[in-house]
Amino acid sequence: MEPCRRCQKSQRSWIRWCLEVVESFSIILTVMFMLLVVKALFWNRGCEVKSSYRRILTDKSTNSLGAICNVTLYSDQCYSTLLSVNSTEPRVLFRASLVTAVEDHVKILGVFSNLVSSDESVLSSLQVCDEMIVDSLEYLNETIERFDEFGKIMTNAEIDEIRGKLSYVITDHDTCLERFDEIMEFDFSSYKRNIGKIKRLRDSMKKGRELVSNSLAIVTKILGRLTKQDDNKSLLGFLETESGFPDWFGNEDRNALLTCDLTPNVTVAKDGTGQYRTISEAVASVPEKSSSRFVIHVKEGLYVENVEVTKYKYNVVMYGDGKTKTVVSSSLNRIDKPNIDTFQTATFSVSGKGFIGRDMKFVNTAGPEKKQAVAFHSKSCQSVMYRCAFEGYQDTLYSHAGEQLYQECDIVGTVDFICGQAAAVFQNCTIRPRKSIPTQLSTVTAQSANDPNVKSGFSIINSKIYPFEGENLTATTYLGRPWKSYATVVVMKSLIGILINPQGWVPWDTMVNPPTTLNYGEYMNYGPGSGVGNRVRWIGYNPNMTELEARQFTVDDLINKHGWLKETCVPYNGSL
């Protein structure tokens, strides 16, 4: 009996062991199954949406928020910003996105200017960023104010205004972040206590840019689909009166515009026959944030100075005695002044909205070996340059931000000599590449749109591209290269000379393929360099635009949807 009992005991032990193994294996299988479920939930994100956000969305049935955030570039940021908003109304969510962006900017307002450094380049970069933050915050607040004035369903012109303002903010952010990229390459040994703050500020700027980018995507792709027909009484940027003029124009301004009267408020003359001898003195006399035109006549002469029309100098009209007679000249450049930004090298720089320049020439004489040296820089919204000349080498004309028209102008340069992120049309212009140093390529444009929804792009219409006279142009010359990922340039109905390389366009870095998100195109050009048979085969380049595609880049469609150009007394063709 004893052996039998030991056998039974052994059997029971074996069975218990088997049950324990089965139980353990079941637990393992259960854990593995749970891990697989979690992994599936985490990776099955769809448009980069986090699983936690997806679960909350399902619980709240907020399909509206999902539709909105899925059109943005930074959907995680969008969800974290808007989940707490107790509404599914697109307008409410858009406004909440704007308010969050404002709050984010307020947190870092003035922080840049409080940092210290023994490095002048760093100090200059911090100053630029501080100015960009102030500028961005003003435009964001202005955007909210204008948005609150609009009806529940906005017109196309109102959508265009909001897009324009937010695009301006995006440009400010990109300008600052470019300087951050330069800062991070410097030696921080002399001010290590600031490196942490600078990195955090850079991250804050990137977050702020993401918030603005998301707001821009929402107004473009969501609110932009819910538009109504434009009311002719409501033009972008102002309310139109019965007379057809903006409501901030007084009777004297209206009469002056009806007759295109350019009676000057002040006159500049080197010989002392005007109120001022320098242009800078005359600009200093312009009242800030004025709703009236301030007209400055600059008499014939060579004015060697660097002029800045600051952002609060609104509605300045400046005219000379002709683009070969009234000349503003300087030679600032980034080789001699490496601590300043490219736009700060400008001979003439304007930021105040509504600037109109006529019959003048702007020159930077630094030379091709001095690299970035701007002749004319503009961040002026709703600005026109008429019968003007811009002469330099690299980065001659920096069309930085805003809606701008260059009508019947001459533009001369070597590398990227029409550059920037503005929405700009160059109509009936002569564009003339000139001789550069032997190692340089010559590129007409370097457009820097860096977001798919920004109101940005260069349109060259009914213009002529041929060599600068009197110089032996030997450099390989292209229509442009993409400065940033969403670079947008079209050349339409223009004479293209034999100087343009048959490929037409060139990458920013010739060793790296261009971004597939660029937007380049040509339409009905003529001349020996206009053939598209040997053009690049890039994604994003359209060698044969249709008429419908080309219309998107006309004066009226790209920069004049609200009709502001009719107030400038400058002739233009709004269509093809």
Image: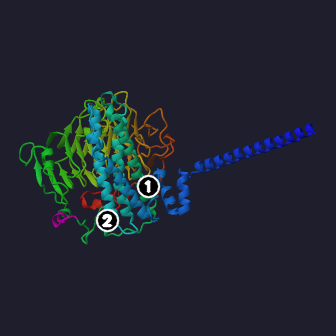
Magenta stretch: includes residue 254: yes
* Residue 12, disc: none
Instruction: Please name whichever residue, 70 or 451, is drawn nearer the observer in this view of the structure.
Output: 70
| Residue drawn at 46 percent across, 43 percent down | 531
Residues 305 and 25: in front is 25
Is residue 297 something that shows in the picture?
Answer: yes
Above or below, comparing residue 477 to residue 548 in the picture: above
Residue at the spot 82% in from the left edge and 41% down from the top edge:
13
Q: Nearer the viewer, residue 391 or 191?
A: 191
Q: Residues within 10 Å of mark 2 (few under 14, many from 20)?
A: many
Does label 1 or label 2 sit earlier along the sequence?
Answer: 1
Looking at the rendered image, the disc whose residue lies closer to the viewer, 1 or 2, is: 1
Label 2, secondary structure: give it.
Answer: strand
Which residues, given as a range, are shown in magenta? 248-255
Left or right: residue 515 compared with residue 148:
right
Rendered image quadrant of residue 412: top left
Give me the disc on residue 235. Answer: 2
User: Magenta residues: mostly which secondary structure?
Assistant: helix
**Label drawn at residue 81:** 1
Q: Judge left or right: residue 218 versus residue 316.
A: right
Q: Would you say 395 lies left or right of 40 here?
A: left
How many neighbours does mark 1 have within 10 angstroms: few (below 14), some (14-19), or many (20 or more)?
A: some
- Residue occupying image coordinates x 18% and y 60%: 292
Distance from disc 1 to disc 2, alpha carbons, whole Å, reads: 32 Å
Residue type indicated by callout 1: Thr
Along the line of sight, the residue nearer the viewer: 95 or 286: 95
Quarter of the image for residue 158 reads: bottom left
Task: Find residue 441 and report its horizontal and vertical position in percent.
Answer: 38, 33
From the top left corner, tell me how far across and down residue 299 is, in percent. 13, 47
